[in-house]
Image (tube, grey):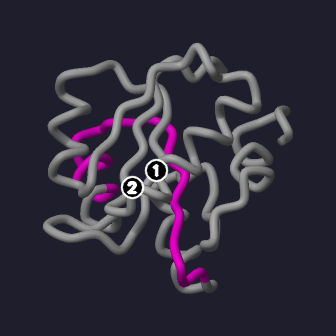
Amino acid sequence: MNYNNILVVDDSSTARMIIKRCFDIAGFSSSNYFYAENGIDALTMIEKEKIDLIITDLNMPKMDGNNFIKKMRSENNNIPIIVISSVVNTLIEEEFKEFEILGIIKKPVSPAKILEIVGEYEC
């Protein structure tokens, strides 16, 4: 799948830039990147832009990643999602199965892991 419009949702500007750099290295340099610091801003961005892939943190202010994903899926929005979290365990993995998440990555973010989940590209 082509990911022309990628939305990165994380309250850390450093994490957002690491993710963008990874995709650039993997050949997605012509992709458009959109950024949001929380779930509320992300929902607004999704209404304005055609987003092909979302990469979201779980721990964010205002609206966390859990509530953001639940809200999106309750509105029948099936944009592919990759979750990034400092805590990954079987409980979290089980919780997200019903939301059809592409994958969950434990922080610190590894470019190779992101690309492994997205598909055939490697850093």
Q: Is residue 6 magenta?
A: no
Instruction: Please name the residue shown 43% across and 29% down the image.
Output: 33
Asked whether 99 or 46 is in front, the reply is: 46
Q: Which residue is mark 1?
A: 16
Three-letter code for the amino acid on which mark 2 is drawn: Ser
Asked whether 29 or 80 is in front, the reply is: 29
Q: Which mark is residue 92?
A: none
Q: Is residue 119 left or right of residue 98?
A: right
Q: Which residue is mark 2?
A: 13
Measuring from the top left, give residue 122's x and y in whole percent: 85, 39
Measuring from the top left, give residue 80's x and y in whole percent: 51, 39
Q: Is residue 29 above or below residue 85?
A: above
Instruction: Please name the residue shown 32% across and 62% down the image.
Output: 11
Three-letter code for the amino acid on which mark 1 is drawn: Arg
- The answer to the question of whether label 2 and label 1 lie on touching residues, with beta carbons closer than 8 A, is yes
Quarter of the image containing the C terminus?
top right
Instruction: Determine crowd level at label 2: few under 14, some 14-19, many 20+ residues with C-alpha closer than 10 A.
Output: few
Q: Specify start and end residues of the magenta stretch as a single range.
A: 69-88
Quarter of the image containing the N terminus?
top right
Measuring from the top left, give residue 38's x and y in whole percent: 24, 57
